[in-house]
Amino acid sequence: MAALTLGAVVATATPGPWQRTESREPCDAFDSLRAPYFGDLHVHTSFSHDAYLWVTRTTPADAYAFAQGAPIMLPDRSGGLTRAAQIDRPLDFVAVTDHAEFLGEVRLCTTPGNPAYDDDLCRRLRELGDEASEDADFIAWGYPLGAPGALGPHAFCSIPGVDCAAAQVSVWQEIQAAAEEVYDRTSACAFTTFVGYENTAAPLGAHLHRNVIFRNAHVSATPASYLQTAADGAAQPLWGALEQDCLGAGTGCDALVIPHNSNLAGGLKWPDPIDAADARRRQLREPLVEIFQHKGGSECRFDRLARLGVGTVDELCAFEQDPRALQGPWPFPPITTYPRRNMVRETLKDGLAFEQQLGANPFRLGFVGSTDTHNGTSGNTAERGWPGHQGYADSDAEGQLDAEQFDAHRIRFNPGGLAVAWAEENSRDAVFAALARRETYATSGTRPVVRFFAGELPGLQCGDANFVERAYQRGTPMGGELGAVRGQRSPRFAVLAMKDPGTASQPGADLQRVQIVKGWVDADGQTHEQVFDVAGNAENGATVDPVTCTPMGSGARELCVVWRDPTFDAAQHAFYYARLLENPTCRWSTLVCKAEGVDPFAADCAAQAAARGPVFADCCLDESNDPFLSPAVQERAWTSPIWYRPDGIAAVRGAVRFGTTPGRDVLRLALRLRKFPTFLDPTRSDLTLRVTDDDEIFAYTIPAGALHAVRDARCSTWGGEDVPGNVAMVSLRICPDRHAVLKIRTVPTDLGRADRSDHTVTVSLASAHYEVTHTRRWHARQKALGPLKR
Amino acid sequence: MRLLRGLVRAPVTHFVLLGGALFLFASARPAAVRSPAPDTIVLGADDVERLRREWAAQYGVPPDPVQEHRLVETALDEEVLHRQALALGIDREDPLVRKRLVQLARFLDAGPLEDEDELQRAVRALGLDRTDLIVRRYLVQAVRLLAAGPRASRLPSEAAVAAYFDEHRGEFTAPPRQRMTHVYLSAESRGAALERDAARLLDRLRREGITPTAAPSLGDPFVRGADIALNSDAVLDRTFGPGFAAAVAAVPERSWTGPVRSAYGLHLVWVHERVSARVPQPPAVLSRVVLRLLREHRDARTRAVIAGLRKRYAIRTDSEIPGDPSRSPSLLAKQADAAE
């Protein structure tokens, strides 16, 4: 071993603005300005009943090994494990999320000797069947999850001597063990795993699935499957199970819920909140949505042939759309009756309306992508050489283009996307914290790198070498809350994007352009949207060579812009997210069809397809005859939105001044709010102020009625100098136009938990379901820590 | 080494103990002793050639000697398992096999027979139960599952864990890494002036002795920042583009060098330090080592069972099996004699 001392290399744990909840070596590669980590949060192995039916025989260990670069064996059409697959670039983090339902049953059915083994349903699971039986087997195994009144374990669980529940616990232990076995707790931080599972609610084909991701090794005793949460797929029982078994268990357990495939949910993925408390609860439990994956994109929808969209005229919303609104062999709905809340952008807009109405936004959704592979091939998103995601069923060209399946026209599926988290280091705490604060973006499978900020950002320019640091000091990153502005002028939005560098054999595509998608709600509660081109060039003429599929024409290696919203209205709740588009590249289906002698670009494609076989008819779908499919696509990335709240914090001034001796620190803060909520009356509601980084630096609740009202000429002031606790003075001034200033000064007290280095600090103000935050990188001087002054 | 003290408290413990206690494997069917004379397995030149061709079709190149040896060993294992399945009578009793054979019979249009038993017998008479690939794979899988045996319910000893860690240090070792600061010059914003700007800036950095803290502000903003903490070559290539790590590998430490080309432009690089491959401290890898060890024990048990089954057979080939001199025909005959 090198004499080079470990002491020099292993630093003491540097603070991120998150708790360290596990014992491990601190990461050598720690970057307080954060780095992009690429992962897949949706992976199935043979532990999932549907994957097993598709003859997947990989285990969680195999899925993790694949993510790190090891080859994996996949079944061919006859069920033999003869195909090898390997990822082109390793992932940084992965969660294996097998279906919680039937975990035990699958294990019992595949273990000879136990009484369930010879049950007919078990035989059907193991049977290397033919196409006729495939649908029937899926229905036999899956119908409890979809048929009303049928929810429950399979019948063989009642055979004496068969204990499905115990088997489920045993398999859940193995899932945890597999994640632990490869999670790198050394300072190299090469690979992170998360324990997780999928709750697979599917009443009558409505795809109400939700994944659960745990922060660390303290997890629920059993996964909460749909058999347990039931309620026709409503999410509340799942949250309740997590609150009870994990969040409130006092074990250090933490988890979040990520819904996916709202595009197939029949409009039911995100029902209206029951009340303000329910809205707040959903915001806390479901900070993210898997907006892109194998079974299509859920951002937005536009039908090219009808020239109509779902609440949009954005033609780029034709990208990777599944024509159905529900899972199952139902006819495709026309765009005019397509359920709005199948699409995330519509849901985000509705969230603003609820925030305006209730004071809490239930649909505050950040974005991640993932694969939903049922092969155990985590992160296998390359369009070229894609081996499918459904075992033997899509193991060859015929399978991948099959249009007569129960499930779909398979050509509509795609290799899936990736989740990218901006985190200080590649550890569970750091990456989970990034997921929880929504500092994430989704890609459609490639690896461009993109930053997005909003805020005052005074003087920020694209040429600034310390662009990123300045952006964190004077703005909020993707996923965050912009708060309000003091005047009427639009805040500034900054995007810095760099292309996927690619590999030696497969260079990344150039970037075409950056857009900012804005949604807002007006005073009448009507929602609106607009898409702005902010950088790059939509008319760069980039295309693909129809013969070789080589990209033609050039684009940008990087794009940068600092932008103001020309339509900004300071009184309107709004969200903004950045969408990055690459130059066109050939879709996986184009490469497969061409290899089979059917060229989607050829004028006589139809004749070629007819000659090759009926299953190849879908090869000829393109802009002229299909509402959504294109032989060449523009891969893209979507950053989590940044939310503007007129009732949020417009500015924070002040600082922590550290005393010469411990325990003699003083915090002075002034918070400016633009529109103090009308439902908040300091005489009747508690108001809690918190200042947090990785710890809670300071927290104070002003009890209802603790402040004395003083009316001056115009505004109402509540003040108090004899308030309880370690506060010397607190005052709240609310003017008729609802502008408000909250000032607080502590007595000399212990604020030593505030780290004395430049790092991110969050100030929040909360009352019941209302909470507004202000997050910035604070600056540490010799005796003080605070946000940068103007 | 006080590894196991930590081990008992480690999360991994409850995986193993509960897993073993909760889920007991019911007794397997006893292996039937069929006949005293060992069977013979013949591996012909045709068989080996077929394996070579299948590999080449999959990978585009013929297998090298090591790969070919493994192919042959796998084929022999499968044959042994298949015969064991037959010896256990799984083929006769299993309903799945019946169903598959009936399927075959109907496909082959076995005449006026309608009764499933009759159909089955007809197909067996044709020997299709032995040659059908799907039946064969199913039988091999069933026996392999039996061979894996019950899960462990005891933790390995401290000595075993320590020995395993020593033996497999390489797998837990962090690769060589470097820490660097770079000044980025963007091809996009500098265009034709890129090379000239880089040369000028490099000259200035050296001439004026500008520190790595001050230097990045003289360049362009990079989305990952200017300070790249300890990272391996693989991570550097993923961040900057293929070939970047190789270009930086020979660069002297603590001085400005470059320009190094990336997918985005040119970089002037200051390598702070290089850290050679490092073996981690045992506590950080404890649970990984134990879990790996347990999994290997399970795999070893499976292999031992298969090896035990193999001993009952004599392997005969009419050509040398590559990569394994012990498999030459003359030696095989000796083995067969010894096994009896």
Image: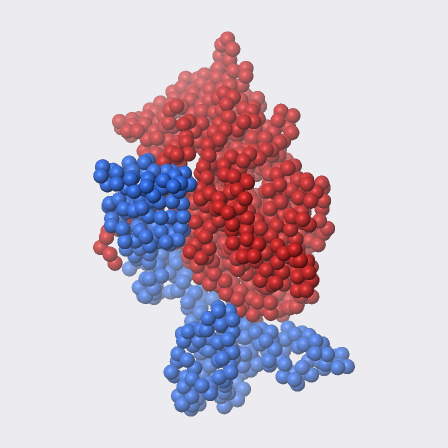
> In the drawing, does residue B101 fall left or right of residue A103?
right
The residue under the point 34% across, 52% down is: B245
The residue under the point 57% across, 74% down is: B137
Vertical comparison of A545 with A757: above or below? below
Asked where in the image residue B12 lies, by quadrant, the reply is bottom left
Image x and y of residue B71, in percent: 46, 75
Viewer-side residue, B243 vs A741: B243
The residue under the point 59% across, 76% down is: B133
Q: How is the image coloured?
A: by chain
Chain letter, red = A
Count of numbered circles in the view: 0
Asked where in the image residue A337 lies, by quadrant, the reply is top right
Vertical comparison of A262 with A469: above or below? below
Q: Is residue A17 visible?
A: no
The residue under the point 67% across, 61% down is: A609
Viewer-side residue, B54 vs B198: B198
Vertical comparison of A615 with B34: above or below? above
Quadrant including the N terminus of chain B: bottom left
Residue reaching furthest right?
B112
Quadrant including the C terminus of chain B: bottom left
Viewer-side residue, A745 vs B184: B184
> In the drawing, does residue B244 fall left or right of residue A673?
left
Q: Is residue A452 visible?
A: yes
Image x and y of residue A437, in percent: 47, 39
Q: Which shade is chain B?
A: blue
Residue reaching furthest front?
B192
Image x and y of residue A534, in percent: 51, 35
Vertical comparison of A245 with A311: above or below? below
Image x and y of residue A89, in percent: 44, 55
Viewer-side residue, A752 vs A462: A462
